[in-house]
Image: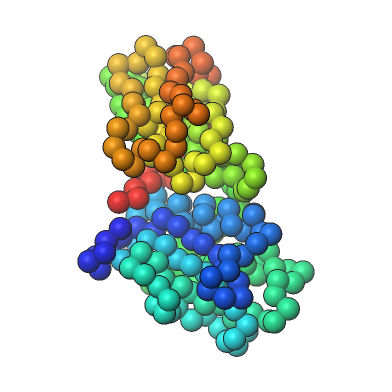
Amino acid sequence: MTKDGRPSRINDIRLFAGSAANDLKGFEEQVAFGRRLAWWLNGEGVSIGAHTALYVWFADDISVGRVDPTDRWCDWWFRYAKIGVNASFPGIDAGTQIEEGIVAGLKAAAPALAETFDRGARTVKAHGDKLRFLLKERETKRYKMEVSCTLAAGPTNSLLYVSLQDKASGLYYEAPPAEAETIYFDTSYFAGLVKVRDLSASIAAKASPASQPVDVRQVGDLVWSLSDFKEAQRPETSGLINFR
């Protein structure tokens, strides 16, 4: 986040309806679509300015279909994109309308990146809850290790994955995932818990204050042995997520 106005990567998209203070309720798949798209774009290094979050606000006090980026009611880390809808919103086709509104809001915030937003939306739609987001990567002499996660639509838990790629053969191996209920808000913390036994490099839990929102006693270290890894196909995965 850059309070001084420098560009930063987008990391969050949130949905509102009626007034700027009312979260859009009952559309968990669309909430997940927005989150996935924000993270996918983050992995591509996309910025919409100093704001790291876009709040997409569906309102009936502007003409239907109009998109109005506004800094009113905003703070330095987020801005609104107001989307004009009918007074009857949400209606029968609200799911599609919401997803199209998210993309329209992004385009209004950064018009030069329209093709990037369309491409990202297609990727998110095509892979849904199977799409992976790369949180950490490390290398040893033999392996490239990746820690990634899915972003599930609530109330389903997201999944945290650890994979190894043999640098000599190119073969990809994956261990069974761990469930993580709050991964959307504590990704760097969960990624920091990962340890792989018998591997010369491991990732230990962070000791910084940022690691404190999740009580480690509820999770414990997430530990896999090399025998847990089975050969697999590498799924569609974002670039490395960077929230700074």
Question: 100 or 115, which lies in front?
Answer: 100
Query: In x, y percent, where is residue 94?
Result: 70, 68
53 left or right of 82 in image: left
72 left or right of 124 in image: left
Residue depicted at 36% across the width and 38% down the height: 211
Query: In x, y percent, where is residue 137?
Result: 35, 33
Residue depicted at 61% across the width and 65% down the height: 24
Task: State whether residue 104 is above or below residue 239.
Answer: below
Tell me, yes or no, if residue 65 can be seen here: no
Task: State whether residue 214 is above or below residue 169.
Answer: below
**What scheme was used to colour the molecule?**
rainbow
User: How many numbered dots are placed on residues in this image?
Assistant: 0
Question: 3 or 92, which lies in front?
Answer: 3
Query: In x, y percent, where is residue 114?
Result: 45, 69
Residue depicted at 36% across the width and 70% down the height: 75
29 left or right of 232 in image: right
Tell me, yes or no, if residue 68 can be seen here: yes
Task: State whether residue 205 is above or below residue 211.
Answer: above
Give the residue furthest to the right.
92
Q: Quadrant of the N terminus?
A: bottom left
Query: In x, y percent, where is residue 216?
Result: 43, 29
What is the quadrant of residue 12 in the picture? bottom left
Residue depicted at 32% across the width and 32% down the height: 206
What is the quadrant of residue 90 in the picture? bottom right
